[in-house]
Amino acid sequence: MSDILTLGVPVLDKVVRTVAVYLCVVVLLRLVGKRDMAQLNTFDLVVMLLLSNVVQNAIIGPDNSLLGGIIGAVVLVTGNSLLTRAAAQWGWLARLFESRPTVLAHDGRYDDRNLRRLGLRHADLDVAIKRQGGSRVEDVAEATLEPGGTVVVRLRPEEENATLADIARLEERLIRIETLLAEGRRA
């Protein structure tokens, strides 16, 4: 029972290991690209799952104690929170870890160069277009892959869904037309 709380490595060693591995994985994911966050296919998911197992020993070292695991988890969550808050405050830091939006389609056409560079297929973008109200790439004014990995699709105006405000304006116009027609019949 005492092994649960007995650390196999000093606390500072565990903190340094955790921070170093965290920063290494963040930089690695930044270099590989934001696609991994946007469209995880089966291969990407397997890599992400295995990556966590691969870096586990680098973080915990020869320490299998409960307390060691808790320290590693606290350092990871705290470090991530601090880095996220710092990136939100300082734009240069956000740009260092995140890239700019990447155009995937424009004016109804795929940007094949960017899709190839990101390792995305037309089918991957088609799914995002359908999720956001379009039917096909021809419906798209612009589709971008945002720094956080989200695909944002802006449809051509004629392909956009009507809003409640649009319907209210049409209803108002119909009432005016009906009023004019009724007055014309009386005259």
Image (cartoon, grey):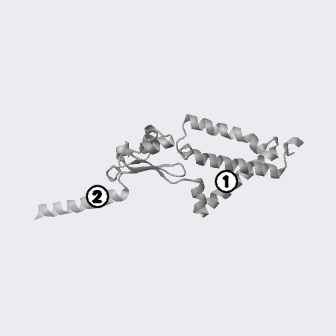
Residue 39 sits above or below residue 82 on the image = above
What is the secondary structure assignment of the residue under circle 1? helix
Real-space CA distance between mark 1 and mark 2, rounded to the nearest whole angstrom: 49 Å
Residue 175 sits above or below residue 18 on the image = below
- The residue lying at 44 percent from left, 37 percent from top is 123
Residue 135 in view in this figure:
no
The disc at residue 80 is: 1
In this rendering, position of residue 48 left or right of residue 4: left
- The residue lying at 61 percent from left, 64 percent from top is 89
**Amino acid found under the numbered disc labelled 2:** Leu
- Disc 2: which residue: 170
Q: Residues within 10 Å of mark 2 (few under 14, many from 20)?
A: few
What is the secondary structure assignment of the residue under circle 2? helix
Q: Give the image location of residue 178, x and y in percent.
A: 21, 59
**Residue 5 sits in which quadrant?**
top right
In this rendering, position of residue 100 left or right of residue 1: left
Q: Give the image location of residue 104, x and y in percent.
A: 44, 46
Q: Quadrant of the N terminus?
A: top right
